[in-house]
Amino acid sequence: MESTDGVINLIHLADTPGTSGHSVSVRVLGRFQPGILTGHDFLDCEIVIVADSVSAAFPVTLLPEDLQDWEDALAALRSRRSAMWLESGRTPSMKFKPDESGGLWVSVYDGSASGVTVTVPLFVLSSAWVDEQRDLLTRVREVYPREVVETSPGAYEWRRDTRS
């Protein structure tokens, strides 16, 4: 799900069309500090929630390890287990709780800034929703590959292209 303004989704969960209209997305807006070694691989993002009369957006900066953590969360969700993501306290956190009927409850807790919690029920998801989220993660990694390597604590350099 790519937009015309270059924004791509890392997460896009939505009830099927014609149902509640609820959705939760994590939109990647671009690199946090492009061209600067210590911030180049961080991603400037926003968590966007739409549900009935509530619409909210929470800014978030993702680190490369956050993408791995999302992959791990997807593994839990594939097994129909609850998962937490972004639990460091530096950003809003997200909780994903599958229910018995095949739906998913998604909560965003913005403890680091506003203290607000928003919980959105998604009742009618696509049967392949976990695979769809994996595809979005793969796309983000393709568009924003890691280009910086930490050679020792606090020392960074541009990753050399090893392709011939």
Image: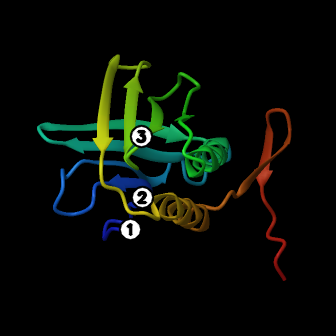
Specify few, some or many for label 2: CA neighbours under 10 Å numbering under 14, 14-19, or 20 or more.
many
Q: CA distance from mark 1 to mark 2?
A: 6 Å
> Is residue 130 positioned above or below 112 on the image?
below
> Is residue 123 positioned above or below 138 on the image?
above
Tell me where residue 59 appears, x and y as whole percent.
38, 37
Q: Nearer the viewer, residue 21 or 56?
A: 21
| Residue type for callout 2 | Asn
Q: CA distance from mark 2 to mark 3?
A: 24 Å
| Residue type for callout 3 | Asp
Label 1 belongs to which residue?
A: 1
Label 3 belongs to which residue?
A: 99
Is 115 displayed left or right of 40 in the figure?
A: left
Tell me where residue 90 appears, x and y as whole percent.
53, 25
Q: Nearer the viewer, mark 2 or mark 3?
A: 3
Label 2 belongs to which residue?
A: 9
Residue at the image position 56 percent from the left and 40 percent from the top: 81
Q: Nearer the viewer, residue 88 or 34?
A: 88
Task: Of the two numbered discs 3 and 1 on the same chain, state the one appearing first in sequence.
Answer: 1
